[in-house]
Amino acid sequence: MKEIYQQTAEEVLERVESRESGLTDEQVRRSREKCGWNELAEGKKKSILQIFFEQYKDFLVLILIASAVISGMLGDVESAAVIVIVITINAILGTVQTVKAEQSLQSLKKLSGPEAKVLRDGVAVQLPARELVVGDVILLEAGDMIPADGRLIENASLKVDESALTGESLAVEKSMDIILEEAPLGDRTNMLFSGSFVTYGRGRAVVTNVGMQTEVGKIAGLLKSTSEKQTPLQANLDDFGKKLSILILIFCGILFAISVFRGEKISSAFMFAVALAVAAIPEALSSIVTIVLSFGTQKMAKEHAIIRKLQAVEGLGSVSVICSDKTGTLTQNKMTVEDYYIDGKRITADAIDVADPAQRCLLDYSILCNDSTNENGVEIGDPTETALINLGSRYGIEAAGVRKLYQREGELPFDSDRKMMSTLHRIDGENRMIVKGAVDRLLELTDRIWTKDGVREITEADKEKIQRQNQEFSMEGLRVLAFTYREIPEKHVLTTEDENHLVFLGLIAMMDPPREESKAAVAECIKAGIRPVMITGDHKITAAAIAKRIGILHDLSEACEGADIENMSDEQLKAIGATLYHIDRGGDITYHGPGQLVCYPILNLDEFALGLKEYVHLLEEAVIRVCASYDIEAGRLEKATGVWLEGDTPRARKICAIGVRSSHYVTMHGLALNVNTDLRYFSYIHPCGFIDKGVTSLRQELKREIPMDEVKQRLENEFRKLLRIPVAKFGA
């Protein structure tokens, strides 16, 4: 059977046994019996008693219980009581902490559930979202939260923020078109998903999935199905307990045997051995660990981090990789203007001068040709549009004031076919139409350009320059809008035919910027030996741009798409055009390929009075000098062989790997200098074992192809100088 997004609206309505006017009460009852309530199922909660008894699962605690029982049987009631009291206090502490954490998590849930506008038997009603059923027709407009998964059956320029599900910051333009091919979640543009928000336009959709069957519900189900694993501390304590128990039993057994051998009564020898075993058990260990971990959770709570289980505190200390979402975690989840481009100049948002007529004009026009609002901190509208009016507020220019001064007298709403939006205003005594949209599309309709010397005809050179700037913005992961305008006759009603013969004004570039604290947090992780990884549904270029800003990436080649990850198996090698060779060398895996200068000098170090360490230093020096000949400052990094750029900074990246072996003072292996290397291959491995450092090449640093023979000659010359070898002997 076809997927829902591969079917027409009519076919979907028939499939869910619904109609455009909505369900009847009887149909609602039948659907609810079949699919249940529209809510996420909560996992079975453990009672306080269950949580309390779980504290006794540790092997060491079980040993303590056994020792208490034995102590009681031997008549040592005092010792038995002490042990029981200690382990009971431990259990109470662990239970209290777990219950407090659960209560804190519960308090984070919303106090009231969302509501939905629904057509029931042709009548629009407002209902709690949990009462929705499959087949319901929901009505949506800007600002609404989508309460369930559904298929669009009516669309009026609908845009939806799906960042909570896909990580994509920009609102997705929805359409009624059938998607013929199999498509990932983010590309199902005729579908709506629970938990996302309408930012622009309006529409109707028929509910296709509710509750745990929604895409959000499926994620919740996966989270529920994950199995619990022991933390390193739990595993170590269990291992310690087992080893200690065996050691104590062996020792006590030996003492029992010696006592019997010396002629003592078997009963007396046995009682002595058992008493010794009980005494050897470190009953205070468990309580000390529990108390220390409790202090840790309290400290974490003060930092607004809720720890559900005591042992997780220690587990966090063993983390080597942190995987993080992008949108809203590393970024602000709020589109922000980054740059202006006007009159051939790029201007950062911080450097905008509202006193400059051209820049002020672009700012005003971006507010006027805009349907979003921001009143009392409540933003309604497309994120890119709210970014434009927020920029005005930043410079003390409020949208309401500008719109009141230049009132809208006509409009042509945005649609995905035209890729533009137009509004008509009375400005400086003239009827002026402002048009914003995709750069490529508007340049086709533009025949003039605004400059500081006045409006003139636009040339091909002007268009090429604008396109280059647009590409530059795009490579930095920025979303770009072009702004144009033209004069319109009096009492003229706007039509799409008026969107022609436009005057180019400028470009505005924006993005979802990183949080201020993200860069510092990433740097701290790297310093601590933790590898930060960003996982997002964004386009690769957009994601890489953010990752580079905060220090996770050094180069686009390090970014890896989902399709690449799925293929990371034996088939991956074929997919990336690589071959795996097993050789007798240190490390797990390395990479050699085209564009890499691999040099394996074979020298008798004894002849040159060199030790292996001095020889490696010499190889590094030769490469450092070659880099210097290209005006690239390279150097060494402590406890890391090879040649590095910016080695003592978070931007450290290796340009040359060095690995040397020797047998009877004769050298093997050598160096691999990245000249014109395809750095993409390094994203599949941890180069030289480093997880927090990047890889670069001469081409990457110089932004041009470097002749390989030229580099070879320069490297040979430096070797010859450092080794003081004549050319002929070196070549031999």
Image (spheres, rainbow, N blue to C red):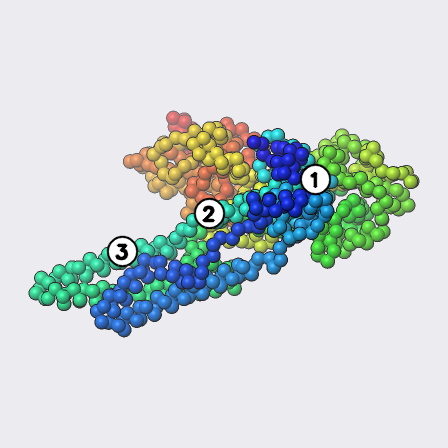
Mark drawn on residue 243: 3
Whether residue 349 is situated above or below residue 591 in the rendered picture: below
State which quarter of the image contains the C terminus: top left
Q: Residue furthest front?
A: 26
What count of labels does the image hold? 3
Mark 3 vs mark 1, CA separation in Å:
70 Å
Dot placed on the residue nearer the N-terminal end, 3 or 2: 2
Disc 2 residue crowd, few under 14, some 14–19, many 20+, Cα 10 Å: few
Mark 2 sits on what residue? Answer: 225
Residue at the spot 30% in from the left edge and 57% down from the top edge: 240
Mark 1 sits on what residue? Answer: 20
Q: Nearer the viewer, residue 76 or 353?
A: 76
Q: Quadrant of residue 592?
A: top left
Classify mark 3: helix, strand or loop: helix
Dot placed on the residue nearer the N-terminal end, 3 or 1: 1
Mark drawn on residue 54: none
